[in-house]
Image (cartoon, coloured by chain):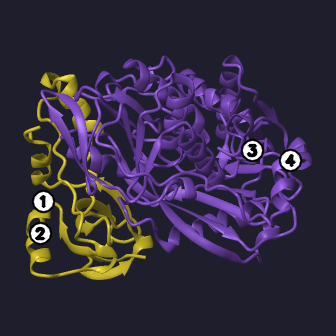
Chain colours: A yellow, B purple
Amino acid sequence: MFYIFCPYCDERREEEEFHPSGQAHLVRPTDPESVSDEAWGDYLFFRDNPRGIHHEMWVHRLGCRKFFNITRDTTTYEILETYPMGEQPTITAETARVRREQGVQTADGGWQTVGAQPENSTLNEETSS
Amino acid sequence: MQRYSGFSLVKHALSHHENWQRHWRNPTPKKRYDVIIVGGGGHGLATAWYLAKEFGITNVAVIEKGWLGGGNTARNTTIVRSNYLWDEAGRLYNHSLDLWKGLSQDLNYNVMFSQRGVLNLAHTLQDMRDVQRRVNANRLNGIDSEVVTPEQIKEIEPALDTSKRARYPIMGASWQQSAGVARHDAVAWGFARGADSLGVDLLQNTEVTGFKIRDGQIYGVHTNRGDIEAQTVGCVAAGNSGVLANMAGLKLPLESHPLQALVSEPLKPILNTVTMSNHVHGYASQSDKGDLVIGAGIDGYLGYGQRGSFPTVEHTLQAIVEMFPMFSRVRMNRQWGGIVDTCPDACPILSKTKVKGLYFNCGWGTGGFKATPGSGHVFAASLAKGEMHPIAAPFSIDRFHTGALIDEHGAAGVAH
């Protein structure tokens, strides 16, 4: 059960008043007519699905009915911050890694596999064989 | 492999059942395989078994980071049916249902497949139209399915509240007699034992940490037990597919959600069949042990925690009590969550990728168990031939760019 802080109501309320609405900070292509099928498909269907820090949109549907954003860890389910629409998160996968290096450990071994890290790509680089 | 039979049961009884063979070996990884399957759940093990049995490729490794069948195979509500709306999905799930029918004999392992039928209830006029449309589509595709009236439903499942007094009175249902349930763990174990006996290496506690890719061609994987090489790699990792895709520099249109289920204390036999209601939003069947096996919708947020929120459990039980008022005082024994990889169109992805030799079988979302043998069979055929099997071809990842989606949100059932 989440206990969520609504940045508009300025108080913590129970999860049942809220509804998750998917990934935050998606930008609709400004000129849909000129967008390729590839880019349009990416915009419509492809989402970040990280094991770790995720920025997501929620709506306070039984409260003020406004949308806002949450930064949450998808392995520990810990809510790290909530912030209104239009603002940027202060905690990202990168800053969270700093937090991990400083020795902050949450339940479930939450930091060990923070996903969507760019350095994962180095695993794919050629090794002499 | 020791064959199981009535005779072997008697023979082993003489030695107090102390000399049964282990189900499978625990081998050391080789340096090279012809094919690597990443993910040792039902679908991965089925893929390995069909690769070895039907296509003669036995130099295969199944790499599993935990233990075999410990993910969604161990966590689902064991329902098997094929009454999907669209031709492509109907073919895929019905292919699977056909394989289920002979599976215990094929594997020499009792998967306890019981064709006790599935009811999909309709509570509104629109529900009835959807049911009729789906039944008609099913019949055109050779899937046994019929529309039943509340009186017939009462015959099939007397425990259901079919009265007019219900908050959401039942107006009818679709009925698939050939659907049913199977013993989920036995499916994983049967495939694992079968694959192992044909020479497949099942590598447990081995986690893939990266892919070896050169000039757009895969040639192996990095694991926590060293590098393993293969020109063909099939990823069948359910909820963790997105994490694997990320390692290969790919993106999948998947979102991983917790899906919860629960079982009650064991009761005497009361449910004859599987009952699902999209509208009231719950489904229930009874296991051979006697527990009511109950499930419902996913938790709406992303989660890899294999657990969900209590409000979802509460909504689920409200739905069950609405359908079966007599269960209002039944106590629930256990509750758990699995990570399901949901696709935007509620259909799976069986696809090649832009990396040559790297295949994905994922996105089964909330309904993968029923497809276990069919998914394994068509995926094995695709890996063996390097070309997607005709049944699997429409489920290419390209459909999210071409627009040829297969929208199964209705038939995918309650969870969506």
Indicate whether B281 appears above or below B392. below
Q: Quadrant of the N terminus of chain B?
A: top right
Q: Which residue is mark 3?
A: B113
Q: Secondary structure at mark 3?
A: loop
Q: Which residue is mark 2?
A: A97
Q: Secondary structure at mark 2?
A: helix
Q: Which residue is more in the foreground, B211 or A66?
A: B211
Query: Going 47% across and 28% down the picture, which residue do you hit?
Result: B380
Query: Going 62% across and 32% down the picture, which residue do you hit?
Result: B96
Q: Which residue is more in the foreground, B330 or A4?
A: B330
Report the Cα–Cα distance between label 4 and label 2.
60 Å
Report the Cα–Cα distance between label 1 and label 4.
72 Å
- Please state which of the two labelled residues, at mark 4 or mark 2, is closer to the viewer: 4
Asked if residue B89 lies left or right of residue A115, the reply is: right
The kind of residue on which mark 1 rests is Gly
Q: Secondary structure at mark 1?
A: loop
The kind of residue on which mark 4 rests is Phe
Q: Secondary structure at mark 4?
A: helix
Query: Going 74% across and 47% down the picture, which residue do you hit?
Result: B110
Tell me if label 1 and label 2 are in contact, CB under 8 Å: no
Q: Which residue is mark 4?
A: B7
Q: Residues within 10 Å of mark 2 (few under 14, many from 20)?
A: some
Report the Cα–Cα distance between label 1 and label 3.
53 Å
Q: Which residue is mark 1?
A: A86
The kind of residue on which mark 3 rests is Phe
Asked if one can make out residue B162 in the rendered structure from this viewpoint, the answer is: no
Q: Which residue is more in the foreground, A83 or A129?
A: A129
- Please state which of the two labelled residues, at mark 2 or mark 3, is closer to the viewer: 3
Report the Cα–Cα distance between label 2 and label 3.
47 Å
Q: Position of residue B394 (x, y in %)?
A: 44, 22
The kind of residue on which mark 2 rests is Arg
